[in-house]
Image: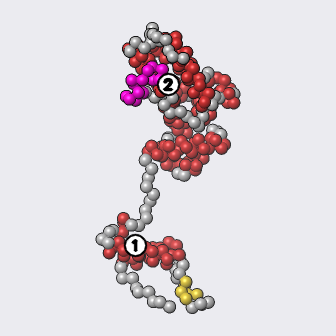
Amino acid sequence: MSHQKPFHDKAVAKLHRLIYKTLGFCKYDNPGNGKIAIKPAQRLCEIETYKMRDSTQNGATYEKIRRGRPIALTCDARREAIFAALEAVHAETGLDAATMQAIALRAGMSKRTLYEAFPSRTALLRCYLDKVTDQFIRPLSASDTDLPIAARLDRVLSQNARHQGYGLPLEILRTFMSQVPTTPEIGLDVVERLLNRDLRILAQELERGVARGEITLEHIPSAAALLLDMVRPWPIESLLDPARLATPDAFAARRHLAIKVFLNGVSTCALDT
């Protein structure tokens, strides 16, 4: 039986005492074969001791080697993880079952961490709906502003195609509509942040077309509202019957047709068919 040299390093000895005290493990004699069996805590001591001695030899500090808390997620990464958890819970059990506790559990975080990101479930759903809308329509990048108007409108309305579908956003919208009689500020917030925002972005692109002589419009805000209604399916049918919700391919086909019909009515020259 080999004899281990005593540990003289005070830090090592302190680490040993902490591990043994915490885990309650120690080495013991095995009378069956006359050898010393080493339980996990002793093995952990040996590993940590090696690291400490090795770090001393290499001039590194122990703090740089020992394991610590996981690297914290950035705010954006945490929000994306929460949104992904919301989508997963909704897909499995529906929106009603997507409680803050269920979302936190699916995201692998505590409820406290979740509430630090979103003060309430309503706030979480509002931000998720805003994210979906941001995927639907966004201002053009500088490199796309030289495209013909048909291509610009198509790009504005489809920069980030949503392949997950619109079942969850529609359910969130239905939930908000049911809360309007008691909390009307929810409806006002959705209209201001979502609808009016989209209209402003679309009107900006139509103004560009008028300035370049590509189209003729008497009232740009009204034209923007008309085009937006043409692109988006009427929501009442889907709200009443979720089975009528259009697929992403159907949305794309409707968008192409709406832009073509709209421009054929307002263009200053004939468009290619």
The one nearer the camera, 191 or 211, is: 211
- Secondary-structure class at tag 1: helix
Q: Residue furthest front?
A: 272
- How far across and how far down the image is residue 178, in percent? 62, 28
Residue drawn at (32%, 72%), measured in percent from left and top? 58
Quick one: label 2 or label 1, which is nearer the N terminus? 1
- How far across and how far down the image is residue 141, in percent? 40, 29
Given this view, does label 2 or label 1 mark the residue nearer the observer? 2
Q: Residue furthest top?
A: 218
Give how far apart the Cα atoms at labels 2 and 1 are: 59 Å
Q: Is residue 223 left or right of residue 52?
A: right
Question: Which quadrant of the rendered structure holds the C terminus?
Answer: top right
Q: Is residue 220 left or right of residue 233?
A: left
Quadrant of residue 59 within the rendered picture: bottom left
The amino acid at mark 1 is Lys
Is 142 inside the magenta-drawn segment?
Answer: yes
The amino acid at mark 2 is Asp
| Magenta residue span | 140-154
- How far across and how far down the image is residue 62, in percent? 36, 69
- Secondary-structure class at tag 2: helix
The one nearer the camera, 185 or 107, is: 107
- How far across and how far down the image is residue 109, in percent? 52, 51
Category of crowding for the residue at label 2, using alpha-carbon neighbours closer than 10 angstroms: few (below 14), some (14–19), many (at least 20) = some
Residue drawn at (49%, 43%), measured in percent from left and top? 79
Residue annotated with mark 2: 154
Residue drawn at (32%, 69%), measured in percent from left and top? 60
The one nearer the camera, 166 or 212, is: 212
CB within 8 Å, label 2 to label 1: no
Above or below, 210 against 79 in this view is above
Q: Point out which mark residue 51 bears.
A: 1
